[in-house]
Amino acid sequence: MDTRTDIDYLFEPRGVAVIGASQNSAKIGYQVVENIVQRGYKGRIYPINPKGGEVLGLKIYPDLSAVEGDVDIAVITIPARFVFDAVKECAAKHVKHVLIITSGFSEVGNAEEERKIVAYAREHGMRVLGPNIFGIYSAAASLDATFGPGGILPGRVAIITQSGALGIAMIGKTAAESLGLSALVSIGNKSDIDESDVLEYLTRDEATKVILMYIEGVKHGSRLVGMLKEVARKKHVIVIKSGRSRRGAMAAASHTGSLAGADEIFDSIMRQCGVLRAENVQDAFNWAHFLADAPLPKGKESVIVTNGGGIGVLATDACEKYGVDLYDNQAVLKDTFAPVMPSFGSSKNPVDLTGQATAEDYKRSLEAMLANDDMHAAIALYCETALFDTDSFADLLRVEYQHYKEKKPIIFSLFGGEKLEAIVRKLRAEGIPVFSDVYDGISSLGALYRSWRNLNAPAEVAEDVQIDVAAAEAILDRAREEKRGFLLANEAQQMAKVLGLSMPRSILASNLDEAVRAARTIGYPVVMKVVSKDIIHKSDAGGVALDLVSEKEVIDAYQAIMRSCRAYKADALIQGVEVVEMVKPGVETIIGARQDASFGPIVMFGLGGIYVEVMKDVAFRAAPISRREAHAMVSDIRSYPLLLGVRGEKRKDIDGIVDVAIKLGAVVDKCRDITDIEINPLVVYEHGQGVKAVDVRILFQTTREVR
Ligand code: ACO
């Protein structure tokens, strides 16, 4: 039975009960009632406390059963030991959502009580927000059911936060920065309702234009990825994630897992979803503020206008850093700006009006830029000079912002003394995108451009890969019979065949004659490796010979291998040798897929050797993936130019890598028993020449997962 209730009731409840409503203004149970009253909630408020009486002019009910009207949400503000009984009362009253503000559950090790409450609530058709939260604010219902400082302004930004303290602090900050909110949800321990549930509502909420999320850990990553991909194609989504240092803890058992930790995975997957990741709260707020009001650009070319050369250069650097493209048609720039600048100015972008520019020159430049349809966004910089009257300059910016507001994105950056700083603060409070630091402004414009590209991107549909799951499982089952959770080389070969991966040709030879024949069949040069379950480290035992180019070399190598392996381990049972095609050199890459603790099936890619191990130059995607997503993953790595071909080399077979990435993504998605699959190296040849999986390692669960 699906016990989900409609998430809309959480944001637009008809009636709200506060269980633990207190007359004591120092208590959370009082502050929540006070905020609900002060914000002007449109529905009915039911304070609950067995003591009865009145609070803030509202009747206090002794218990929920005494309430006549519908109660869609119940905010619980009583000590942890009483919460379960209160939840039972809520069920009897057919409450739809219980919001448990109370702390003292899984965050302090009391997970059992939390599980019990959630299970009971779900069985009775209720959802649980929290516990360990500060509440919810919803502009749609004029509801502030938090114990925050109040004063939340209605607006277009929705905040979802896992951290309570930070969330409460954000309330104060939004008020200080005049940032209007459409919703604010504290998700705390996420025992039931999590980010994805909240996003389900916000994606449909017309008032919400920007979603800002503070995340500490991801629980149901696959669902979150699906939700974020959908939301980020409709709205701007910003995420701040803490816990970068947790990378070690997240490293999986496999080699791939130890190459990069959770943070890189999170980062890559947010990019895949089209979510903007902010390094810190200030960036996130700057972006949210800007994105909430900025019109979407009609193209990607921006123009910088400045009265200072130095700051113009800084802005140019910032544009490169944040992915803001600059308009570059020199003839048009000259025609547009020559009339408003002295002969020693520069009409190249950045357009430098020089320190001699007057307010009038500045105004005319901004208007000339606005009038040109090929100039899509404006970056207006100003260094304080004696030629400008600072007060009237503020008015000029107000007027220009009004002109731009609906038509083109514009950011202003003003640098100077206290008077100018005061203007920055004043204009920001009015919602005008003015920044002291040019990097902050351009970082916000860069965020708009990144989000704009996502908003325009087509929906990603994972490639439909046909995998013979039964054949793959049969290979695993045979290994399971020997209680093994990994495949031997020949089994990995069989698996590669099932997946359609191109591996070097290989033949098992049990004596010298067979080895010679095998080498002839495969064609020289070949590699020879000892096959023995008793010899794990073949090279150490002298059990590997490379680059054998003739029959004579095969015979000599065979005898040498047998001699040294016997010397290494006299009682080793040697089944024979594996004769393998000697792979031609190419670019060595590493590609893998696995079940990630947070995100479920994921794929990874990096260049081999030092690129992966020292530079940690790897990219990830949540699987299964589309062709475009696979391409994006490959091009995400810093060493990507090496695949495009440097120093006259030809482009490498990137499509071949993409094919393998798609297959690996599909196999870990379809066979959840496979915990880790890694191809190292995957040798990549020139474009059209394909790729070769030289070594395939597969780990899996020794017991089959029931699905
Ligand atoms: N039904 C209704 N009312 C009840 C019930 C009940 N079953 N049981 C007790 N009450 C009343 C109490 O009588 C009291 O009212 P009173 O002031 O009239 O006496 C009121 O409910 C509150 O109960 P107290 O025992 O006084 O509890 P107190 O207010 O001290 O603490 C609280 C309760 C706030 C839930 C506390 O246990 C707690 O968990 N605090 C932490 C909250 C928190 O930080 N949450 C995370 C937020 S995010 C962040 O990190 C900032």
Image (tube, helix red, strand yellow):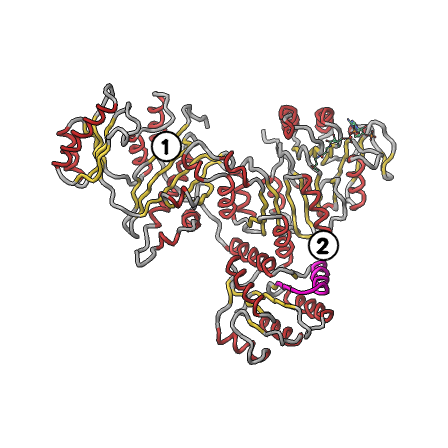
Confirm if mark 1 falls within 8 A of ligand 1: no
Lateral position of residue 79 relative to residue 196, left or right: right
Residue 516 visible somewhere in the drawing = yes
User: Which type of secondary structure does the marked residue at label 1 adopt?
Assistant: strand
Q: Main secondary structure of the magenta part?
A: helix
Residue of label 1: 698
Residue 428: in magenta span: yes
Instruction: Point out residue 300 in the picture as x, y percentages from the top left corner.
Output: 51, 63
Image quadrant for the N terminus? top right
Residue of label 2: 178
Q: Determine whether 287 is above or below 381 in the image.
A: above
Label 1 crowd (10 A; few <14 / some 14-19 / many >=20): many
Q: Amino acid at mark 1?
A: Ile
Q: CA distance from mark 1 to mark 2?
A: 54 Å
Instruction: Point out residue 252 in the picture as x, y percentages from the top left corner.
Output: 46, 33
Q: Which residues are magenta?
A: 411-430
Residue 214: in magenta span: no
Foreground pick, 573 / 503: 573
